[in-house]
Image (cartoon, coloured by chain):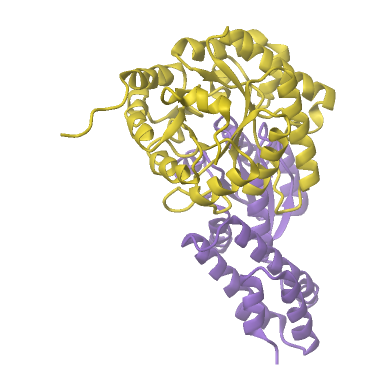
Chain colours: A yellow, B purple
Amino acid sequence: MALHPFIAELIARGPVLTDGAWGTELQRRGLAAEELPDAWNLNRPGEVEQVARAYVEAGSQVILTNTFRSNRIAVGERHTPREVANLNAAGVAISRRAAEGKALVFASIGPSGKLLLTGDVTEAQLSEAFSEQAQALADGGADALVIETMSDLGEARLAVAAAKATGLAVVACMVFDSGKQRDRTMMGATPEQAAEALAEAGADVVGANCGNGIAGYVPVCERLSHAGLPVWIKPNAGLPEMVEGRVVFRSSPEEFASHIQGLIQAGAAFIGGCCGTNPDYLRAARRILDLGPSPPCA
Amino acid sequence: MADLEGLYEAILTGDAKAAVALTEQALAEKTDPQTLIHKSMIPAMNEAGQRYECEEYFVPELLLAARAMKGSLELIRPLLVASGASTAGRVVIGTVKGDLHDIGKNLVGSMLEGGGFDVIDLGADVPADKFVATVQEKQAQLVCMSALLTVTMPSMKTTIDALAAAGLREKVKVLVGGAPVTAEYASEIGADGFAENASTAVAAARRLLAAG
């Protein structure tokens, strides 16, 4: 399979550090549970930019955008199509400002929150929503598009097709958190099946994000690489737990970083974090990446 | 002679059309509805749940089985009502206040319907007083709450407290679930039960109502 030239150039000098979580970082800055995080792109752009800037300063070479839910199905009735387009454009502009040319901006597209299988949404509705969002992000000046946190390959494929139509490079990643080994999507797809289906749909990079923490994503990474495309990995800092009424993520930055070498060996081309990770985790990962490949065992 | 084996297979494999046709045929032959339920339908759903636990089934297969079950049950339910037999129980289900995620909640709702429960779905972002009012009005025996976000988990406790304040806590069981929810959290907030997934939710619901 021919590598997308933009992606090929980007990963030519080794694994690329992406960014960490946005949602949990915005919550730390006062985002309330019932608020749409993406609405802060228009209401509190300064705070959103702080999150993005912190990742650039931590050494991220690729940062995402606060546009995960900015499609008309996920935002529901709360915003008009015009507002949705504005959320996307503002999201790209904020990340672009924070990057200051030191990082690339890969714009985020999340799931619709509805299931095709139950008939709560149709393929045509999904395609329309994803096309609208992908185009708004591309028009806003994104360098590439990232489809993330998908549970259903059917929905992910529609998103990939919509994203590809913009002409930008497309990363597509699923959540593997089901089954006893936590190596299946909610719908039961294995990493091999997912990588193959996403590649066939036109993805330039395939991957895994969110999930149950970084350790389990090392073998998932290796299995995703079988499709022959670069692999993108952004795990959680473990699963959130409630301790005395407070949300705690169990993996420390050091523990998180201790698996980075494993991910590199498993073939990861892009490495970052998802829920619960913050700039400390990315700094720790940056240190490992800067060491270069580990020497072969004696 | 009713094709009990065929109905079992149709539900287990999620073939709703066949399940409905076989149920109609069996009822036309005057088969006792209770026989269909206990010899074909419930065993089929139990097997589907077992296959889910063993990773032979995933969400799609489980959901299709539940839908086939529901198709059959809709034919049978009027006969059960006429004969005075009740449903497995009346359930009020919703995603708690502040949380818009409804996929998991919908799956649990479908599985409970497949399990013979009468399910009242309040949707997502459901305030505590809505749960309370519905329990009161519909005389529900079980409240199922879902949360996907750690920040909305406390809304479960708010709802349980509101049920207590309305004097309903002794009359209704509370079952909670959702990705970040754990058994420890469930007991911490005073819920009666916790279910890790849609399949175990049905068994947990039956257990809670049987315990009275």
Between B200 and A23, the one lying in front of the other is: A23
Q: Quadrant of the N terminus of chain B?
A: bottom right
Residue A117 location, x and y as percent?
70, 54
Judge from the rendering whether residue A221 lies leftward or rightward of residue A111; answer left or right.
left
Question: In the rendered image, which quarter is residue A217 located in?
Answer: top left
Identity of the residue furthest to the bottom in this view: B1
Residue B19 location, x and y as percent?
72, 75
- Which residue does the image show at 57% across and 34% down from the upper left? B153
Viewer can see residue B84: no
Rendered position, B118 above or below A184: below
Rendered position, B69 above or below A2: below
Question: In the rendered image, which quarter is residue A14 located in?
Answer: top left
How many numbered dots are placed on residues in this image? 0
- Which residue does the image show at 67% across and 17% down from the upper left? A92
Residue A59 location, x and y as percent?
45, 14
Between B145 and A30, the one lying in front of the other is: A30
- Which residue does the image show at 52% across and 42% down from the upper left? B190
